[in-house]
Amino acid sequence: MQFTSYELYMLINSRPTDRPLWLANADLSEADLREADLSEADLSGADLSEANLSEADLSRAKLIGAYLMGADLMGANLESALLDEVDLSGARYNDDTKWPDGFDPPPEAIKVE
């Protein structure tokens, strides 16, 4: 199931602040999630291919096994995110992208200068 822009807006902006967003295995391919607060969200196994996550807050998010092929991660905050088995093939990032301590983006990801 793919979400409409309105459904995504409501999911992200109307959740209780004391509960993380749960979108495990969701189809978020090509979603516009610019500047979205996805901190602590469970996105395990989610399809985020070609999604625009520029400037998004993904700190402490669970992205285990997520698909981020071709995603825009420029300026995204992924500090303390769980990135085990994540596919970053073709994902774009820049110097403003914040990664978890000790994480090095794979060569399949593209650094934009």
Image: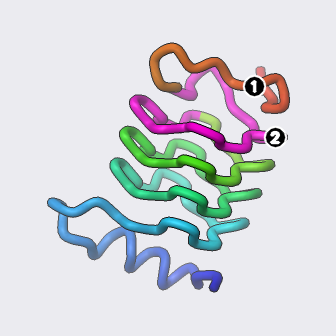
- The reply to whether dot 2 and dot 1 touch (C-beta < 8 Å) is yes
For mark 1, what is the residue? 106
Instruction: Name the residue located 55 percent from the left edge and 47 percent from the top edge.
Output: 64
Amino acid of disc 2:
Ser
> Quick check: can you spot residue 42?
yes
Provide the residue span drawn in magenta: 75-98
Secondary structure under the numbered disc 2 in the rendered image: loop
> Quick check: can you spot residue 37?
no
User: Residue 22, relative to residue 38: is it above or below?
Assistant: below
Q: Position of residue 96 (x, y in %)?
A: 56, 24
Q: Position of residue 80 (x, y in %)?
A: 39, 30
Secondary structure under the numbered disc 1 in the rendered image: loop
In the rendered image, residue 79 lying in the magenta stretch gets the answer yes
Q: Nearer the viewer, residue 91 or 88?
A: 88
For mark 2, what is the residue? 89
Q: Nearer the viewer, residue 113 or 108?
A: 108
Q: CA distance from mark 2 to mark 1?
A: 8 Å
Instruction: Name the residue located 42 percent from the left edge and 44 percent from the top edge.
Output: 57
Instruction: Name the residue located 42 percent from the left edge and 57 percent from the top edge.
Output: 42
Q: Position of residue 32 (x, y in %)?
A: 61, 64
Q: Quadrant of residue 84?
A: top right
Q: Looking at the image, how many numbered discs can be counted on the residues?
A: 2
Q: Nearer the viewer, residue 5 or 88?
A: 88
